[in-house]
Amino acid sequence: MKQEKFKVVDCIRLFIKSLSFNLDSFPKKEYELKERIKKNAYDMLEIAYEANTTEVIELKINLINKMLAKIRLIDFLLDIAVEFMLLPKKRYLKMANSLADIEKYSRGWLLHVKKGLENYTNTGLEELNSTVIIENEKLNKKLRSDKNPDTILLSEQAKKELNRP
């Protein structure tokens, strides 16, 4: 098996592999529950890949939150399987620990992305403020007459605006 550089994806892949082994003992009448668990696990992997490749930070945060929701749903479905005695408690505990690891890495990822957004937003505002100040200075220099710096040159439209009651 190829090891992923991205820890969350690697944990999810290992979890999916263990799922196949652990859900084999489900009776045929509980096919729906078994398939829902598997489907949500594969969806979680797909969301992780999508979040990892997207550049839009807000979308990335949304996808990670969606992945966390899938983790909770899978845990709930596995809990139901234990209640209906479809899954031994020992297997559930191993799978729940794997899910807890995935959740821990996902929450760390989410915090990292949010910090990056915070830093980007603060830096962006500082750059925007300095750009506005520079543009205002340029505008003031353009409006001033070369012959008399105290005289501000106004366009005809600006003069009409000033003279309007």
Image (cartoon, rainbow, N blue to C red):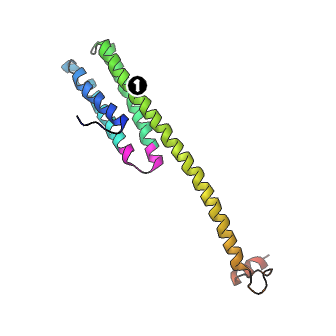
| Total count of labels | 1
Q: Quadrant of residue 50?
A: top left
Residue 58 sits inside the magenta stretch? yes
User: Vertical placement of 123 versus 141: above or below?
Assistant: above
Left or right: 28 with respect to 85? left
Residue type at mark 1? Ala
Taking the spot 25% from the left edge, 20% from the top edge, the residue there is 22
Residue 98 sits inside the magenta stretch? no
Taking the spot 35% from the left edge, 16% from the top edge, the residue there is 93
Taking the spot 26% from the left edge, 25% from the top edge, the residue there is 19
Left or right: 65 with respect to 142? left
Query: Element at badge 1?
Result: helix
Q: Quadrant of residue 101?
A: top left
User: Vertical placement of 86 versus 159: above or below?
Assistant: above
Q: Nearer the viewer, residue 33 or 105?
A: 105
Left or right: 49 with respect to 145? left
Main SS of the magenta part reads: helix
User: Vertical placement of 41 versus 92: above or below?
Assistant: below
Q: Which residues are magenta?
A: 50-60
Residue 160 image point, x, y percent:
73, 81
Image quadrant occupied by the N terminus: top left
Image quadrant occupied by the C terminus: bottom right
Q: Label 1: few (<14), some or many (≥20) within 10 Å?
A: some
According to the picture, the residue beneath numbered tag 1 turns out to be: 100
Residue 76 image point, x, y percent:
38, 23
Residue found at the far bottom of this picture: 147
Left or right: 150 with respect to 115? right
Taking the spot 28% from the left edge, 15% from the top edge, the residue there is 87
